[in-house]
Image: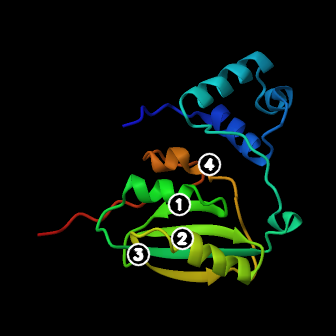
């Protein structure tokens, strides 16, 4: 199990700002949290080393690079468990953007991008269809994306760990039972 690190209010602000703009200067973060830029650099490095910050990347608009079709595909396999072999085969398909192991009727949920429905058909038939462990696919084509890749709700970190959030309503104690 990964070692948990303590995330304080300064770390939360740093994470919010970096999620909004991964290229925000440390001096700008330092001004916001009222700390020295060197202290911000130290905190960011701690968050990177601990794995809280996994990576930095740029977001490319799929339509600008002719990947006009976004889809979610449920995959059913002939195995009751998820296997690294299937994941490796799916990872080798460049159109696949996300791979999730899921519970329920299906084994995996993937998100992929294709140029058009003809391209999607080829990917499903020739690439995904060539994985012998996959017995069934169910595809949902995205008509419009209203929200994608939103920042994680950093404000909830302490609430998840059982600490009260500021401004949260207090729970009234239950009345004692009378005998």
Percent of width and height locating residue 26: 81, 27
Which of discs 1 and 4 lies nearer the camera? The answer is 1
Q: Nearer the viewer, residue 145 or 133?
A: 133
**Quadrant of the image occupied by residue 102:** bottom left
**Crowd band around label 2 with a 10 angstrom C-alpha radius: few (<14), some (14–19), many (20+):** some
Q: Give me the residue at 46% from left, 74% from top.
A: 75
Looking at the image, can residue 147 be seen? yes
Identify the mark at residue 106; answer none if there is no mark: 3
On screen, residue 46 versus residue 144, left or right, reads left
The Cα atoms of the two marked residues, 1 and 4, are separated by 34 Å
**Badge 1 or badge 4: first in the primary sequence:** 1
Distance in Å between CA atoms under marks 4 and 3: 33 Å
Q: Is residue 36 above or below residue 109?
A: above
Residue occupied by mark 2 = 128
Tag 4 and tag 3, C-beta contact below 8 Å: no
**Relative to 69, residue 26 above or below:** above
Residue at 65% over, 24% down? 45
Is the C-beta separation of discs 2 and 1 under 8 Å? yes
Q: CA distance from mark 2 to mark 3?
A: 15 Å
Pick the quarter of the image with the C terminus: bottom left
Q: Quadrant of residue 13?
A: top right
Task: Check the image and report above or below for 42 versus 105.
Answer: above
């Amino acid at each position: 199990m990964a070692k948990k690190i303590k995330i304080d209010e300064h770390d939360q602000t740093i994470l919010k700002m970096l999620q909004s703009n991964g290229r925000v200067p440390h001096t700008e973060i330092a001004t916001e949290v009222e700390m020295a830029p060197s202290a911000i650099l130290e905190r960011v490095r701690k968050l990177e080393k601990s794995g809280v910050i996994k990576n930095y990347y740029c977001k490319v608009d799929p339509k600008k690079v002719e990947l006009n079709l976004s889809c979610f595909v449920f995959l059913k396999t002939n195995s009751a468990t998820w296997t690294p072999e299937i994941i490796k085969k799916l990872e080798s398909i460049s159109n696949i953007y996300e791979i999730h192991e899921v519970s329920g009727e299906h084994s995996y949920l993937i998100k992929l991008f294709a140029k058009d429905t003809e391209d999607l058909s080829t990917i499903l038939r020739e690439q995904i269809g060539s994985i012998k462990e996959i017995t069934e696919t169910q595809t949902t084509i995205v008509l419009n994306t209203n929200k994608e890749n939103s920042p994680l709700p950093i404000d909830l970190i302490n609430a998840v760990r059982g600490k009260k959030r500021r401004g949260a309503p207090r729970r009234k104690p239950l009345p004692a039972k009378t005998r």
